[in-house]
Image (cartoon, rainbow, N blue to C red):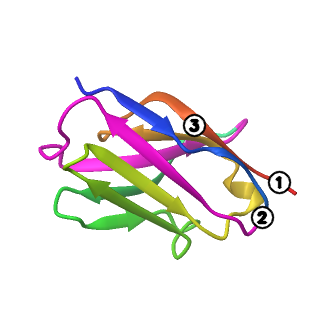
């Protein structure tokens, strides 16, 4: 079972950007779907974005046009570029293959 370690979270002002990384313990080239999820305090975990091994992507309506998911199979890493961040993006972000696992990384958007 692949292990995933998320990084790149932090505190950012509204309108700012962050790039999250998800490092896998083994090759992800055979994993059809890699995904990012998030869970805000008091809310259920939600799917933010996913990407297939062929590069097809899908996004939650709330992040379309602001977030970009990508994967580098040669580095066994998945990324989430987050731009124009809003306070409502504050959450713990988890990587998935495709189910979420790992400890997550905290993203806080606040002035």
- Could you give the CA–CA distance between mark 3 and mark 1, rounded to whole angstroms? 16 Å
Q: Nearer the viewer, residue 10 or 1?
A: 10
Tell whether label 1 touches label 3 (CB within 8 Å).
no
Mark 1 and mark 2: Cα distance apart in space = 6 Å
Residue at disc 3, secondary structure: strand
Question: In the rendered image, which quarter is residue 41 located in?
Answer: top right
As helix, strand or loop, the secondary structure at mark 1 comes to: loop
Callout count:
3
Q: Judge from the rendering whether residue 8 lies leftward or rightward of residue 55; answer left or right.
A: right
Horizontal side, residue 16 vs residue 6: left or right: right
Label 3 vs 1, first from the N-terminus: 3
Give residue 34's position: percent from left, percent from top: 30, 48
Checking the image for residue 110, the label placed there is 1
Q: Determine whether, in the image, residue 18 is placed left or right of residue 101.
A: right
Give the labeled residue for mark 3.
105
Structural crowding at the residue carrying mark 1, measured as other residues with C-alpha within 10 Å and reported as few (<14), some (14–19) or many (≥20): some
* Residue 71 image point, x, y percent: 30, 55
Quarter of the figure with the C terminus: bottom right
Magenta-tinted stretch = 14-42
Magenta stretch: includes residue 77:
no
State the separation of the CA atoms marked 3 and 2: 18 Å
Q: Earlier in the sequence, mark 3 or mark 2?
A: 2
Identity of the residue drawn at 47% across and 37% down: 6
Please say whether residue 20 is one of the residues in the magenta stretch: yes
Question: Is the C-beta separation of discs 1 and 2 under 8 Å?
Answer: yes
Q: Classify 58 as above or below 33.
A: below
Q: Residue 10: x and y, percent?
A: 68, 44
Q: Which residue appears farthest toward the bottom when viewing the image?
A: 65
Q: Is residue 99 above or below residue 88?
A: above
Residue 66, given in percent of the width and then of the height, sits at: 56, 71
The numbered dot on residue 14 is 2
Quadrant where the N terminus is found in the figure = top left
């Amino acid at each position: 079972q692949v292990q995933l370690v998320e990084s790149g979270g932090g505190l950012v002002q509204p309108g700012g950007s962050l790039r999250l990384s998800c490092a896998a313990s083994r090759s992800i080239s055979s994993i059809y779907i890699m995904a990012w999820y998030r869970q805000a305090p008091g809310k259920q975990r939600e799917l933010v974005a996913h990407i297939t091994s062929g590069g097809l992507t899908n996004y939650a309506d709330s992040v379309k046009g602001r977030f970009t998911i990508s994967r580098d199979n040669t580095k066994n890493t998945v990324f989430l570029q987050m731009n124009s961040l809003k306070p409502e993006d504050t959450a713990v972000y988890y990587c998935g293959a495709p189910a979420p696992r790992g400890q997550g990384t905290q993203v806080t958007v606040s002035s």
